[in-house]
Amino acid sequence: MQKRKFVIDPGSKFLSVYGDALMYRQPNVAVIRRGRTTEVLAYGDEALAMKTLPDHAVLVRPVSQGVVRQPDVLAAVLRKIFEKLIPVTMFKAVELYVPVPSGLGMVERENVEKAVAGGGYRDVTLIESVMSFLPRTDGGDTMVADFGGGVTDMGVINSEGIVTACTVDIAGDAVDEKIRNVLLQNKNFKIDASAAERVKLAIGSLYTVDTSSVSVIGQDILDLRNKNFEITATQIAPAIHFCYSRIMDILETLMMSLPKPKQDEVRMNGLYIAGGGAAMNGLTDYLQRGLHIPVYMDKDPETAILRYTARLISEPKYASVLKLTGK
């Protein structure tokens, strides 16, 4: 029986399906109605585009901070996606591989498996996302970091598996929240999470001399009126630096916890970064200056983990390490 392999990434921001010449990526949000079963009325861009919700319907995000909070919703969404993209046939077996944060607990892992298997296919294998970087390295001790929306997963890996790893909830959502707080405290200006995300993507920077700006609508809390404000990169710089400096401190701690020979090898092999948060303007230079090691970013960081995982599960030379890391 011919086997088809797909990578399913149920991230906090996006739900992605990759493999077999397929790349599907949608916001991980759904409009549902609960009854005896969970009915998905819309998901992804279609859900976000709805001006008003149908009666008894709610807008939900099934994944937050890297954890599947509502397995039934995610399973229902995946069933719809699989019916459209990967329909069940008698002659093609399907294997699903799911990159997950290394810090997920047993119950959280079970929720991921339950949700993905609930989509219709039972052959599900979880892989720590830090190990997905292996095809990008030469197999020696190398530091890696996946900057996601809900969590940042980081560690040191080699051809035998994970040397050390940790997951922290300092990621894209935390940066957005910090931007909102900085503008509220310093400018008496209130914006919602989606506006903070747009500001971050437009002018977020780790360069101290960045003079870019963007216009955004929000509420002046002094007169409670909605206004159009011009936000500069300098104004949100404290929020950006606060979050990324903490991540850099953790990366340095991970490296310093290694035996001296492994530290030396990591300093030589460097740090590989991926994920949407890796695209922050100036991040590569910022990490190189702070950690004093080479830093390499994928040309398309948002889809890097999908592509790395696809290589990990398809290339025969990784079969042995895949057996050790897949759970």
Image (cartoon, rainbow, N blue to C red):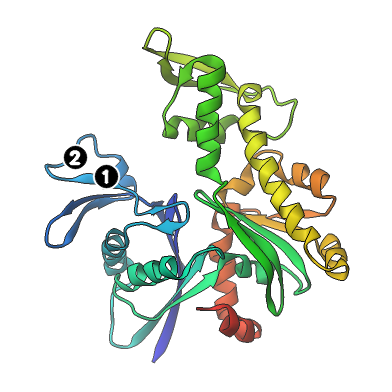
Q: Is residue 24 visible?
A: no
Vertical placement of residue 106 versus 94, above or below: above
Q: In the displayed image of the protein, which residue is found farthest to the bottom?
A: 1
What residue is rendered at 44% in x and 25% in y?
191
N-term-proximal mark, 2 vs 1: 2
Label 2 residue SS:
loop
Where is the N terminus found, in terms of image quarters? bottom left
What residue is rendered at 54% in x and 30% in y?
179
Numbered label attached to residue 53: 2
- Picture coordinates of residue 112, whole percent (x, y): 40, 67
- Picture coordinates of residue 301, whole percent (x, y): 60, 53
- Picture coordinates of residue 242, whole percent (x, y): 65, 36
Residue density around tag 2, few if under 14, some if 14–19, many if 20 or more, within 10 Å:
few
Vertical placement of residue 16 versus 57, above or below: below
Which sits in the foreground, 73 or 181? 181
Residue type (three-letter) at the residue carrying disc 1: Leu
Numbered label attached to residue 33: none
Numbered label attached to residue 59: 1
Q: CA distance from mark 2 to mark 1?
A: 8 Å
- Picture coordinates of residue 293, whole percent (x, y): 83, 54
Residue type (three-letter) at the residue carrying disc 2: Leu
What residue is rendered at 63% in x and 40% in y?
243
Q: Are marks 2 and 1 in contact (CB under 8 Å)?
A: yes
